[in-house]
Image (cartoon, grey):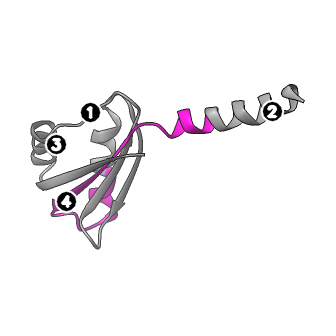
Amino acid sequence: MKRHLILPLLVLWSVAALAAGTQYVMRVDGLACPYCAYGIEKKLKKIDGVEQIAVDLDKGLVIVDVAEGVRLTEPQMTRLFKDAGFTYRGMTEKPR
């Protein structure tokens, strides 16, 4: 009977481990087109540990999922968006 419990527990543990990390939601001014989103995505993908990026042009949001242990900072994002020609307004973070 114990063998039947091990596999499901391993699967659950694996899913939980993959979901670990942080999600950042950033407010950015100046994102007006898909080309703008592409440029930002290219810059963010250069950061080690960035796993997924989504851009909501209508709301001016950039959502970034990072691996566990990776941290994005306000000064880092201010510089990244300024260098790309956009105005960084701030971000919130939450565990995934």
Q: Residues within 10 Å of mark 3 (few under 14, many from 20)?
A: some
Verify CB contact (< 8 Å) between mark 1 and mark 3. Answer: no
Q: Is residue 49 above or below residue 19?
A: above
Q: Is residue 55 visible?
A: yes
Q: Is residue 86 visible?
A: no
User: Which amino acid type corresponds to the residue marked 3 in the rendered image?
Assistant: Met
Find residue 71 and name its label. Answer: 1
The quarter of the picture where residue 75 lies is top left
Residue at 30% x, 67% y: name it. Answer: 57
Q: Residues within 10 Å of mark 1 (few under 14, many from 20)?
A: some
- Gap between marks 1 and 4, in whole Å? 17 Å
In the picture provided, is 9 more to the left or to the right than 85?
right
User: Which amino acid type corresponds to the residue marked 4 in the rendered image?
Assistant: Arg
- Gap between marks 4 and 2, in whole Å? 45 Å
Residue identifier under label 3? 77
Mark before the other along the chain sequence, 1 or 2: 2
Magenta highlight range? 14-38
Residue identifier under label 4? 27
The stretch drawn in magenta includes residue 17: yes
Mark before the other along the chain sequence, 2 or 3: 2
In the picture provided, is 96 more to the left or to the right than 61?
right
Q: In front: 91, or 10?
A: 10
Residue identifier under label 2? 5
* SS at badge 2: helix
